Image (tube, rainbow, N blue to C red):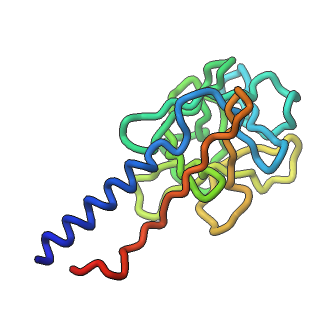
Amino acid sequence: MVGRSLLSLLAVAAVAIQSCAAAVDNGVYRIVFGKHQLISGDDRPGADSVLLPAGQNEFQDWEVENREDGGFAVIRNAKSQLYLAPINPKREHNHAIVIVSPNEFVWRLVPRDNIVLIERPSETPGGASFLSLSPLLIYPPRLDTAWWQDDDRTQQWTFERLDGSQQERHRCGPWRIPRDFAF
């Protein structure tokens, strides 16, 4: 009986996860921080990714291409065709600078209420970090990855489709076991 109930719970969780797998549909977006700052790239590989107001940079449109393994996607600049990536994708540490790179990098897009978290996946338990505004007080503000901090506004992003509509918001997780569920 316990085994069958546990399998039922796992099946419900799998459906919930699949319904949230595409936090952001494939397409071209502007990735917004706050109300008016956009992630801005460059056409020079290795250049820092920064935040700039709309129209301040010609590299502010990003293609999102989802992978079939649930919630994972690459983010590529629509004009330069360079990818948003940490400066050293193999090394996991706090505050890794984020650049535009010719090398594809796979992020995990995590929907949360009305925003999306952009996670740098990790094979180390607790090692995942998130695309974030760098704590350095420089202009233009640089992007980096930082370990999760609950309610940290520097890790919250909005994806706006180029047709002017906002990406449909998904309200996913945290999933809770129903009270009447019996093991």
Q: Horizontal and vertical percent for residue 84?
A: 61, 34
Residue 88 lies in quadrant: top right
Question: Which of the pair 24/125 is nearer the observer?
Answer: 24
Which residue is found at the position 74% from the left and 51% from the top? 133
Quadrant hosting residue 142:
top right
Q: Residue at x 60, y 49 (%)?
A: 169
Q: Is residue 91 above or below residue 9?
A: above
Question: Residue 5 location, x and y as percent?
Answer: 19, 72
Residue at the front extreme? 180
Q: Which residue appears at 36% of the width and 74% of the height?
A: 177
Which quadrant would residue 47 be assigned to in this image? top right
Identity of the residue drawn at 87% across and 37% down: 53
Image coordinates of residue 52 in percent, x first then y, are 84, 37
Q: On screen, 92 above or below 140?
A: below
Quarter of the image for the C terminus: give it.
bottom left
**Residue closest to the eye, 173 or 141:** 173
Does 28 sit above or below residue 51?
above
Q: Quadrant of the N terminus?
A: bottom left
Q: Relative to 101, does residue 120 appear above or below in the rendering?
A: below
- Front residue of 59/26: it is 26
Task: Estimate the x, y position of residue 71 in percent, counting from the top left.
Answer: 45, 44
User: Seen in the image, is 83 located left or right of residue 137?
Assistant: left
Q: So how many labels did they put on this image?
A: 0
